[in-house]
Image: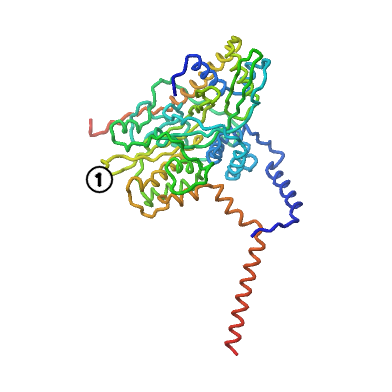
Amino acid sequence: MSKLTPDQEARRARMGLLARARPSRLAALYPELPAHEVLRAPECGAVMVRGRVGASGGPFNLGEMTVTRCSLRLPDGTVGHAYVQGRDKDHALRAAAIDALSEAGQGDVAPVFEALRAEEAERRRTRAEKAAATKVEFFTMVRGEDQ
Amino acid sequence: MYVATKGGERAIEAAHQWLAEERRGDRDVPELSIAQIREQMSLAVNRVMAEGSLYDPDLAALAIKQARGDLIEAIFLIRAYRTTLPRFGASLPVETGEMAITRRVSATFKDVPGGQVLGPTFDYTHRLLDFKLAAEGTTPEAQRKSADETPAPHILDLLDRDGLMEPLETSEDTPSDLTREPLEMPADRPLRLQALARGDEGFVLSLAYSTQRGYGRTHAFVGELRIGTCAVEMEIPELGFAVEIGEVELSECETVNQFTGSKTEPAQFTRGYGLVFGQNERKSISMSLVDRALRWEELGEDNTGAPAQDAEFVLYHCDNIQATGFLEHIKLPHYVDFQSELELIRRLRREAGAEEREAAE
């Protein structure tokens, strides 16, 4: 894949956050949808998840996951897209709206991303800390004949 | 032969109503919610997602509830549902090396970069029933420890670096998909892995066990077993670049197997691979053993006639929905087939009787 521009990189990060957000949390963070025209109504479907043979070889089809997608346009013409895990149509619609608003440079969605980013970081940290607590610290028993 | 018969409608309706009542059980006992199944029966949910071949914990939990806990029936429901979904595309291959790890152990090396992480495992429990769970009590909180940012690279990469592992095929060709084209032999390794990933856990486990007991032995070590979450990325046509569309929990097993080398290959280790949706290490280890056993031909090993070496046998019998569909159909009306059998038996007996009478006369 060719290198992304900084704008594309930022949008990619935002869309990932929106996709991974819990639908109810996203609705709580941004309850009111802006005026918009739906270009592609929220649609549930499946994406084939691929793995790699032997972890780093060629691809193989592992199984599908549910995904909902949506595209819409704001009155100023900015288009927003969403591809979000699961079957929540409201999630996809809201994610597409927030994507469009951030593309249009509307600052009021920035706190949504800040909150999602912080909460996700906290969730990941919690899990990593629980994992770290189960890390084995090997030590070798001193055997009698070695003394 | 199948013929339409009528007259069962009322009985079927009554049977379904009774089924619904039995599913609910004693009404004095609180009803299970989907969220309760998803959160507290998560390994059952994982199995249904893996063998249903659709990652969606809420749907799997619903299927388990509807199937009264019959996991194969639940998998059947998921398989039926997934055929109704439009396919948006395929993800980029998940990079399991970047997994956020909850468990990671190696049976081949004690000290590995990133360490050995036990995670929420049943290992080292005493397998004694815990009657405290029968009484509603408080659940202890998991311990925590500050997590360093040490990366945890695949352990086999370390052997790979020293040239001791067989090289992997790295073709980026679109893999064939058995949900799109009927499974045909010979099946290449990507196709075999797809079939095994959605194959019945019990069947794959038994085959793997048979290789350990000598039926196609492959001398497997678990080089690495890791469980955790991976980001799923997909190219979005509207955008022209890939974005993360979600996260999936995966169990991955890489085995290291003996290979003594051949005329063209130096002695080296070979690989078996298992990757499964959700936390399911038994399935992922089983899958990697069977994957390795199926590779006898490309590695120039002997075919000992072991079941686990027979790709056609393994792949055509590992799908529990195909198996249960064909098995259970024999309980459905076969009145006409059976009538013809009955007619045949009677005729044979009549003819035999006539011959006996002739001989006696």
Q: Amino acid at mark 1?
A: Lys
Q: Vertical placement of B82 versus B94: above or below?
A: below
Mark 1 falls on what kind of element?
A: loop
Q: Given the current orientation, which residue lies at the most extreme bottom position? A: B361
Residue B212 position, x and y percent, is: 38, 48
**Whole-percent x, y for residue B23 in the image:** 68, 43
Q: Residue at x 60, y 10 (%)?
A: A106
Q: Check the image and report above or below for B200 versus A110.
A: below
Q: Is residue B9 left or right of residue B291?
A: right
Nearest the camera: B190 or B330?
Answer: B190
x%, y% of residue B102?
46, 29
Q: Position of residue A102 (x, y in %)?
A: 58, 13
Image quadrant containing the C terminus of chain B? bottom right
What color scheme is it? rainbow
Q: Badge 1, how many Cα within 10 Å: few under 14, some, many 20+?
A: few
Q: Identify which residue, B221 or B268, lies in the foreground.
A: B268
In the rendered structure, the answer to whether residue B33 lies left or right of residue A131 reads: right
> Residue B53's quadrant in the figure?
top right
Residue A126 in sight here: yes
Quadrant in the rendering for residue B42 = top right
Residue behind mark 1: B263
Q: How many marks?
A: 1
Of A87 and B189, nearer the camera is B189
Quarter holding the N terminus of chain B is bottom right
Q: Is residue B359 above or below residue B165?
A: below
Regarding residue B126, the answer to whether it shows in the image is no
In the picture as drawn, the residue positioned furthest to the top comes out as A107
Q: Residue at x 23, y 32 (%)?
A: A146
